[in-house]
Image: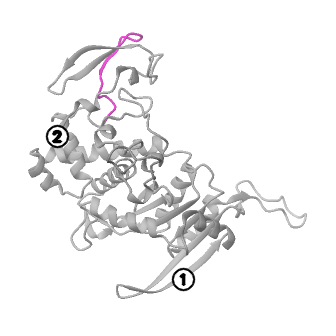
């Protein structure tokens, strides 16, 4: 596997010293290559402003990685394709400690990448669902709950834990902070009761009710607010009744907002009836991408943090590296013998691994389109 493709122009790098005047500011002309070291020809940089020297890998998922870059990228790729740690050891020819360390590093790195890029997302409709999972033992549930943009198939929020109100609360809180307008969207979920009870609190408009009468001191500080559902907001629950493994009845409940608003979103998506088909297809893909989700009978992680990190790495790869056939755009004119649009391509995994956080970046900045555009 070639590794020179991950080398970014020095103009796209920035100083990582917090006390430097040019900290986190790429393209200032303050960095020079002091030396090149290692088998991967890693650049050792020097900031001419603060005189601090550092590796170009600092702040990226490859920082302090002792194996070759090609092997590290291969381990990360196998982790996102549903391979077990033992099989990766045999396929890539590395020690088990390397796989365990990289699983934790790329998971945390993927979460930072998600936090930096998935912001102010303009959405018309969201879908939310959970999928079962376990950690440590089969008695300790570790469900994965997600919120997806039904149009772009972008995973907006991802949480793990027991399937209770606390899990849905964390999921709602994260999703509401990442969308551009949480008061103007339609949410499609299953029949979990917490979805309906918590929806007004996180997506509605809070107000304090007026006093009735003139006795007393009025509402004390910290009194509970009530929540109003705007006209542009709606919540629809799709409740499925099963007999065995077959769905025998589907009940659609318009729990919040108007039916008219819900059908406006359905028309924009091209749906003929309310459903959660996008997030359900994502659930099937996620199970194939994670060794701890592939089978209910034997698949579980021995440690909760291992499953959490692998879940976040899978979300990052799904959002930025995997092409979605349902989002292909028709090209205006044929280009040679190709029939696909090559103008917007998914990110290669090595670009995600070498990406660094804002403020700590000694790796390349994001020059890709806004979230979702690279998948259309």
Magenta-colored segment: predominant secondary structure: loop
Task: Let me know if residue 51 is in the magenta part.
Answer: yes
- Horizontal placement of 168 versus 355: left or right? right
- In depth, the one of 352 and 220 nearer the eye is 352
The answer to whether 140 is drawn above or below residue 290 in the figure is below
Relative vertical location of residue 164 with respect to residue 61 in this rendering, above or below = below
Is residue 14 visible in this depiction of the protein?
no
Sequence-earlier tag: 2 or 1:
2
Q: Position of residue 298 (x, y in %)?
A: 21, 70
Residue at 27% x, 32% y: name it: 5
For the record, the magenta segment spans 47-60
What residue is rendered at 16% in x and 24% in y?
Answer: 38
Label 2: which secondary element: helix
| Image coordinates for residue 278, horizontal then vertical, percent | 45, 65
Identify the residue at image location x=82%, y=59%: 218
Which residue is identified by label 2?
71
């Amino acid at each position: 596997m070639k590794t020179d493709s991950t080398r970014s122009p020095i103009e796209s790098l920035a100083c990582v010293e917090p006390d430097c005047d040019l900290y986190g500011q790429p393209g200032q002309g303050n960095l020079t290559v002091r030396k090149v070291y290692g088998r991967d020809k890693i650049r050792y940089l020097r900031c001419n402003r603060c005189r601090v020297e550092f590796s170009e890998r600092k702040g990226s998922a490859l920082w302090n990685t002792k194996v070759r870059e090609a092997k590290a990228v291969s381990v990360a790729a196998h982790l996102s394709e549903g391979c077990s740690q033992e099989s990766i050891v045999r396929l890539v020819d590395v020690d088990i400690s390397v796989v365990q360390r990289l699983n934790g590093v790329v998971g945390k790195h993927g979460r930072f990448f998600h936090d930096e890029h998935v912001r102010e997302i303009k959405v018309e409709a969201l879908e939310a669902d959970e999928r079962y999972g376990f950690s440590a033992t089969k008695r300790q549930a570790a469900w994965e709950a997600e919120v997806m943009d039904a149009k772009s198939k972008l995973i907006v929020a991802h949480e793990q834990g027991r399937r209770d109100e606390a899990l849905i609360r964390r999921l709602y809180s994260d999703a509401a902070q990442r969308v551009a307008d949480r008061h103007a969207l339609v949410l499609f979920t299953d029949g979990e009761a917490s979805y309906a009870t918590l929806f007004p609190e996180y997506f509605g408009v809070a107000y304090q009710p007026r006093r009735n009468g003139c006795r007393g001191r009025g509402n004390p500080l910290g009194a509970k607010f009530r929540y109003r559902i705007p006209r542009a907001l709606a919540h629809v629950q799709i409740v499925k009744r099963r007999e065995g493994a077959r769905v025998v009845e589907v009940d659609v409940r318009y729990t919040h907002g108007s039916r008219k608003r819900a059908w406006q979103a359905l028309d924009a998506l091209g749906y003929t009836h309310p459903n959660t088909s996008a997030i359900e297809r994502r659930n099937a893909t996620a199970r194939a991408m994670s060794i701890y989700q592939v089978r209910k009978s034997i698949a579980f992680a021995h440690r909760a943090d291992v499953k959490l990190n692998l879940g976040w790495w899978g979300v990052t790869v799904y959002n930025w590296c995997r092409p979605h056939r349902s989002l292909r755009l028709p090209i205006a004119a044929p280009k040679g013998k190709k029939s696909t649009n090559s103008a917007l391509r998914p990110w290669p995994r090595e670009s995600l691994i070498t990406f660094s956080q804002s403020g700590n970046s000694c790796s390349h900045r994001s020059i890709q389109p806004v979230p979702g555009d690279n998948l259309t």
